[in-house]
Image (cartoon, rainbow, N blue to C red):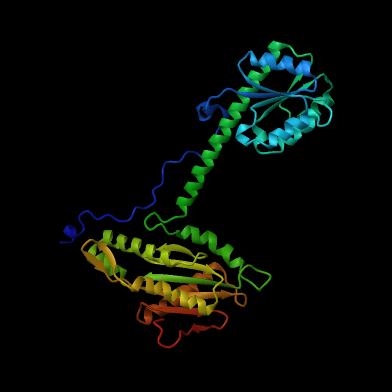
Amino acid sequence: MLSAELEGWQPSPSLVSAPVGGTEPLPLEEVSWSHVPAQVPCIWVIDDDPVNGRYIGEVLKSSNYRVESWESGQLAWEHLQTLDESEWPDLIICDWVMPGLSGVELCRRLKHSAAGQFVYFLLLTARSEVEDRVQGLDAGADEFIVKPVEAEELRARVRAGLRLQRLTRALAQANRQLRARNELLESLSLTDPLTGALNRRALDQALPHLLKQVGPRGQARYRYLCLLMMDVDYFKQVNDTYGHFIGDCVLQALVGRLHNQLRPSSLLYRYGGEEFVCVTPGLNPAHCHRYAESLRRAIASRPIDVSPKRSLPVTISIGGIVISEDAPLDPETALQRADEALYQAKQAGRNCVRLFLPSLLENYCPPPGSRG
């Protein structure tokens, strides 16, 4: 009978972890150049000597590079600031000594920007002293070309520079993709695959940090922190009567309702089995009780559909603790007190709320007529 009712019924999709590669950056030899689209390299030639600049430009154009020439480092830098970073040149050949903005200073400015790390910079110089080379390298220069420039050496150094520049871009892109995959893996490792709620590991990581933010006004981020522990009433009967498949459907639907009711600052964790924990910073005792009641009503207000032909009435019991500056608690104690309050809710007949206030060392009494 039940199988006929459930025909065509599937639980809500759960998160699935895709295969993820290693966690270390990829070595150079394992990075495919296919990650970077092939295009004609763009080269800027910056030289205040128009004859020399024109000569270098003609040599490079004969090798089918896109070449832009500038007679001032300042003008080149100002134009660079008007471009999108994707439009920046692949390689710059710049004279060392120029009036205004020198090649070394231009190189230093460029390499201090994030996108400038991927621009291969060749300093054109007649200087041969070691101290001069060190100064250029410290500014971020990748290579030198010594005047007078010989055409074949220029082509060879440009080819080598572009190979390294393209490989560097490919490596950076591969590492960005790897970081994104690792972030996804980390997210999945903190998420319950059945319900989509955060898991126990996520709670263990977050709760100590949140508790440290509770303290006096002006000295801490929050004065209160509301910790609610929720348990599905008679859930074992659901599994025993209808099977674990239906039980999974109930948990998925329950988490969906809770998420729709949560405050923006709340975090919902699956603590284990049919137990969940909701952590909300900033709620004082009165607001915490009203909030807990709204979560309880969100579940009890109507049955949960587990198949096209069956709905099950489901309720939750909630026990909670409001942590304040007057009574700071460690994570283990906070969870233990919330669990004690949950036990009181169970003893009181289930489908109700019980809060514990450490500062008053007594149970929080809901207003008369309240379900909690």
Is residue 23 at least partly visible in the picture? no
Farthest bottom residue? 368
Position of residue 269 relative to residue 47, above or below, is below
Asked whether 340 or 116 is in front, the reply is: 116
Farthest left residue? 1
In what quadrant of the picture does the C terminus appear?
bottom left
Give the image quarter of residue 316. Answer: bottom left
| Position in image of residue 87 (x %, y %) | 62, 32
In this rendering, would 324 be left or right of 336?
right
Position of residue 73 relative to residue 6, above or below, is above
In what quadrant of the picture does the N terminus appear?
bottom left
In this rendering, would 119 be left or right of 353?
right
| Position in image of residue 310 (x %, y %) | 22, 65
In this rendering, would 366 be left or right of 209?
left
| Position in image of residue 182 (x %, y %) | 50, 44
| Position in image of residue 179 (x %, y %) | 54, 42
